[in-house]
Structures are given as C-alpha cells and as structure tokens.
Amino acid sequence: MAKKNNIPQVKNEEQYEALRDKGYSKQKSARIANTPDSGTKGGRSSKYEERTKKELYEKARHVGIKGRSKMNKEELIEALRNN
C-alpha cells in the first residue's frame, strides 16, 4: 500500500481527514473512506444488537479484531463499535 505523508492510501481523503479529526483510528478512517459509497448517507445495515453472535464474529474477523474468539455477543458489539 503506497503512502503519502504517512497517510494510508485512501479514495476519499477529505472524509479520511474528517474522521481522523473526530478521533477515529487511521485503520478505521481508511476503511470507511475506501468504501465504494464513502461520503454518502443512508446505509441499510441492521443494528448490531439484531445480529447473531456468529454474524458479529464474522464481521469482527473481517475487520481484524483480535481476541474475538473469547468474546461474548456484547463484547463483540463493543469491539466493533470502538474499532
């Protein structure tokens, strides 16, 4: 991954910087700014509380949360929200 001024390569640099200013991590900011529809509103994903533990575990695996195998549903939700 090429870097410019120590910033991960992102598709939407304005959104990336706004997220960093809000306190998001570099990884989370880059992930959000690189989504195909970054900067648009109206996401239709279900709330974490409505998902099964298996679905939350898979999302945590995709995001790269460590220690997820030992987490219960509430801990997975907390980790996903704070990652």
Image (cartoon, rainbow, N blue to C red):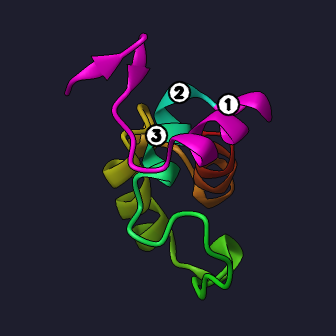
Indicate the amino acid at tag 2: Lys
Indicate the amino acid at tag 3: Ala
The alpha-carbon separation of the residues under discs 1 and 3 comes to 9 Å
Task: Using the image as rendered, state which of residue 66 and residue 69 is in the foreground.
Answer: 66
Looking at the image, is mark 1 or mark 3 earlier in the sequence? Answer: 1
Task: Characterize the local packing of mark 3: few (<14), some (14-19) or many (20 or more) Cα atoms within 10 angstroms.
Answer: many
Looking at the image, is mark 2 or mark 1 earlier in the sequence? Answer: 1
Q: Could you tell me which secondary element the residue under label 1 belongs to?
A: helix
35 sits left or right of 25 in the view: left
Q: Residue at x 42, y 11 (%)?
A: 5
Q: Position of residue 19 (x, y in %)?
A: 68, 40
Q: Badge 1 is on which residue?
A: 20
Q: Badge 3 is on which residue?
A: 30
CB under 8 Å between discs 3 and 2: yes
Q: Badge 2 is on which residue?
A: 26
The alpha-carbon separation of the residues under discs 2 and 1 comes to 7 Å
Q: Which residues are magenta?
A: 1-24
Q: Position of residue 55 (x, y in %)?
A: 43, 72
CB under 8 Å between discs 2 and 1: yes
